[in-house]
Image: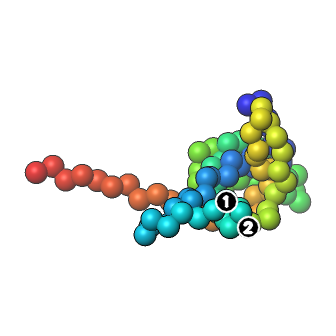
Amino acid sequence: MNLKPLNDRVVVRRLEVETTTKSGIIIPDNATEKPTQGEVLAVGEGAVTASGERRALAVKVTDRVLFGQYAGSEIKVDGETLLIMKESDILAIVEQDKVEEKVA
């Protein structure tokens, strides 16, 4: 992918929505909502402050993020639907717990 977002914009790939509940019920496609989690694929150089300096973004490539259901603009790149959104549209970074295995 040769896509470089400008300023404080971020390119995000939506994560797939689960179509089966924990109890095994299959949810039809027309009853599911758009996923609100995604993986950051590319980030811009940062927002320009009033003093003319760049403020680095809080998100980085490979971060898993939460965003509003209608956040960003959908684009198609190489047949894949991606989102371009401002960093301010991102609500949170999902930190995945690292499971440490204890050696017996």
In the image: residue 59, left or right of residue 104 = right
Q: What residue is shown at x 81% (from left), y 57% (from top)?
A: 72
Where is residue 91 shown, x and y percent of the image? 68, 67
Where is residue 11 shown, x and y percent of the image? 74, 46
> Dots 2 and 1: beta carbons under 8 Å?
no
Residue indicated by mark 2: 68
Q: Looking at numbered disc 2 in the image, what kind of residue is underneath it?
A: Gly
Q: What residue is shown at x 61% (from left), y 52% (from top)?
A: 16
Numbered disc 2: secondary structure: loop
Where is residue 103 shown, x and y percent of the image? 15, 49
Q: CA distance from mark 2 to mark 1?
A: 20 Å
Q: Quadrant of residue 35?
A: bottom right
Residue indicated by mark 1: 29
Where is residue 42 shown, x and y percent of the image? 71, 42
N-term-proximal mark, 2 vs 1: 1
Please tell me whether residue 70 is drawn above or below residue 60 in the rendered image.
Answer: below
